[in-house]
Image (cartoon, rainbow, N blue to C red):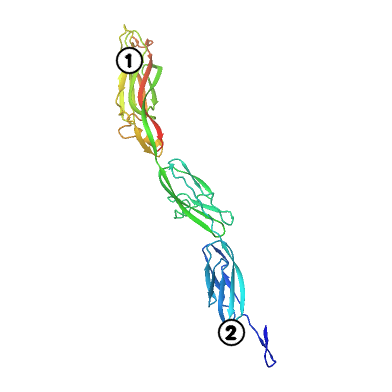
Amino acid sequence: MVFSVLLSGCVAFESTVNPRAVLQAYPLYIQEGETITLDARDSEAVEGVITDFEWDFGNGKTAKTVIGFTSHTYEKFGIYTVTLTVKNSGGGEDEISTNIVVNGAPILNLTIPENIKAGESALLDASESFDPEGKELLYSWDLDWSEDSNNDGDNRNDVDAITSSVLLPTNKSGTKRGSLTISDGDGASQYTTFELEISTRTFEVEWKTEQISFSWDEYLDQGSSWEETITPGLEGRIISFSAVLELDQELGPQDNFTLQLDISEDGYKKSAKTEGGNITANETSKAEMDRFGINPNGEDGTYTADFAEDVLQQLLNKPGFRNGQGEWTWTIFAQQADPDPLFDGLPDPDPGNDWTLEVIIEIQIPILTEIAV
């Protein structure tokens, strides 16, 4: 209240009437980078008219409008006090304030390996991510965009892991793509994609020649047979074999045995009959068979593949180089043991014979050494 004394001796009173400020702010809780709306249109001049709306947004920014409506964007988290001053034409003013809470977005820090080979596990590490306000973060990994693990028709919204870091196994070379979303649980989140370049492995191959041998010895009665199955080509490329069936030395006529080999996968079958040796030279009756150049010799070199097993598959199962693979069935038939009895009903003086079978197979085995490149 202001007063003054007039010359006539009368006292006159001059008064200033303040306006009434009304402020609505919405929303009061926002994320970084979002905008609030400020509405003061319900403010009243009380006397005269409102001439100014002066805004202080609490972050160092101010504005002045002639209408009671504006907006403002907050780029950084924090609690801000918005203050509005309303002025009228009579020189009065009124002030009102409200608080705005701006939630900070989490900071996403993701590291992935630069070099990884097929079969290795990649460490995807987001454990250095943090929330500026100290909130506990939530993690959602979609580890492979080529798969739809939740079967909803969208390959890029799966939740394959929820930990801060993931050890991701790889099973083939190529590019694996995925994504990570972190959230503070309060509406703020960050999203990033990642790519893993998974390389093949490089192997140096050297072929080593080895001989594997098998031997059996048994007795066969006349008219009976013996059979045994081996699988010699599992670890290498078969080059050759030789086999000798030898009967025990006997006086008199030599027994008649047959040695047979059947490699069904190749459609290969071969047999040999025993032939009498020189008795005076103490030679026994034998059946012999062999085969050379079954497959070409291996060539040393360098190969690339995801796994060593892939290289072995390529080398051992290459068309034209896999002869002799599969089962080898050896059979011995005792067709005749001489002499038979001279008269029916009498004991056979030579009912059978002891025998030995020696088989030597030459194979080449690829020795793989991985090369760091």
Res 204 → quadrant: top left
As drawn, the label of residue 286 is: 1
- Percent from the top left, x then y, of residue 31? 54, 62
Q: Relative to the observer, which residue lies in front, 256 or 187?
A: 187
Quarter of the image where one finds residue 89: bottom right
Q: Position of residue 133 (x, y in %)?
A: 58, 57
Q: CA distance from mark 2 to mark 1?
A: 133 Å
Mark number displayed over residue 48:
2
- What amino acid is labelled 2 in the image? Gly
Residue 128: give its label.
none
Measured along the vertical axis of the image, is residue 339 above or below residue 187?
Answer: above
Viewer-nearest of discs 2 and 1: 2
- At horizontal 30% and vertical 14% (from top left) the residue drawn is 275
Q: Earlier in the sequence, mark 2 or mark 1?
A: 2
Q: What x and y, as percent, mark residue 95? A: 61, 74
- In depth, the one of 8 and 312 nearer the eye is 8
Residue 196 drawn at (x, y percent)? 43, 47
Tell me the SS state at disc 2. Answer: loop
Q: Quadrant of residue 219?
A: top left
